[in-house]
Amino acid sequence: MNILIVDSSKKRAFVDVVTNDKSFGYTLDENEKHSENLLKRIEEAINRADLDIEDIDVFSAVVGPGSFTGIRVGLSTIKAFNFVFNKKLVAVNSFEPFLAIAKNGIILLNSTHTTFYYARVKNSKIEDMGTVSTEELLSFIKNQKVYMLDYERYEELKDYDVCYVENYNELLKNVVCAKCKKQEFTLDVEFEPLYVQLSQAEEQLKNKNN
């Protein structure tokens, strides 16, 4: 089975092609705009795997939560491929890869300068998701194990029990491959962005209407 994985929900986008248990992945630099470089990296990964786009059996993407623009770029790209080739789809929640190591605690992902996305985890299952402000963060995570991406280190948490995850992309690949093996595919109509807060434009419109 040949799988294309795209994660454009974070500052560092990730593209991977998995075929015959081999992985051909790229992590984009933070200064590489997703909208300008994602397709190029997908093409490079497919070429490295010695495949053509029509050889892909499963298209997968991280659907959020994360960057509003990034998520749209990734999902629109995958949807365009699937419109042409009509293959299987696998949607992944941004927090799912953490569950391989986060048994209990709080998973944090950068949102804005003043907020974080969070997932509360118990017994390796997500209990709830949402956003928490930087002002409320320290009291919110009190006495909790915290999990974050290695490149999203937050200085205010230096004295807290934080596990910084360095192999997120590998964990993501494992989640997608496991879903494919179990045939846990996503319907096309359900392959949509997962947002847990309003975008800045939506928030401004809401405040204006109020």
Image (cartoon, rainbow, N blue to C red):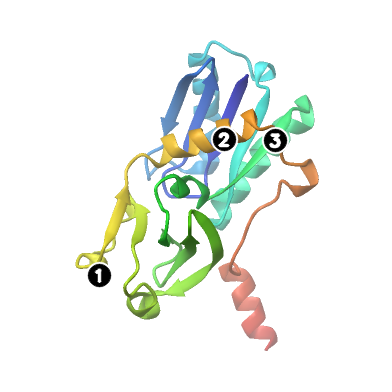
Distance of label 1 from label 2 (alpha carbons)? 33 Å
**Where 32 sits versus 125, above or below?**
above
Residue type marked 1: Glu
The answer to whether residue 99 is seen in the rendering is yes
Give the percent coordinates (x, y) of residue 109: 43, 58
How many residues crowd mark 1 within 10 Å: few (<14), some (14–19), many (20+)?
Answer: few
Please give left or right for residue 168 compared with residue 157 in the image.
right
How many residues crowd mark 3 within 10 Å: few (<14), some (14–19), many (20+)?
Answer: many
Distance of label 3 from label 2 (alpha carbons)? 10 Å
Specify the quadrant of the image occupied by residue 4: top right
**Where 97 sits versus 67, above or below?**
above
For image coordinates 26% across by 63% down, the residue present is 161
Q: Which residue is mark 2?
A: 176
Give the percent coordinates (x, y) of residue 46: 55, 19
Do the residues bearing badges 3 and 2 touch, measured as CB atoms within 8 Å?
A: no
The residue closer to the viewer here, 83 or 92, is 92
Please state, as top left, top right, bottom left or bottom right, where the N terminus lies in the image: top right
**Where 24 sits versus 79, above or below?**
above
Q: Which residue is mark 1?
A: 156
Please give left or right for residue 38 compared with residue 133 in the image.
right
Residue 89: which numbered mark, if any? 3
Q: Mark 1 or 3 closer to N-term? A: 3
Residue type marked 3: Leu
Q: Nearer the viewer, mark 1 or mark 2?
A: 2
Give the percent coordinates (x, y) of residue 171: 44, 38
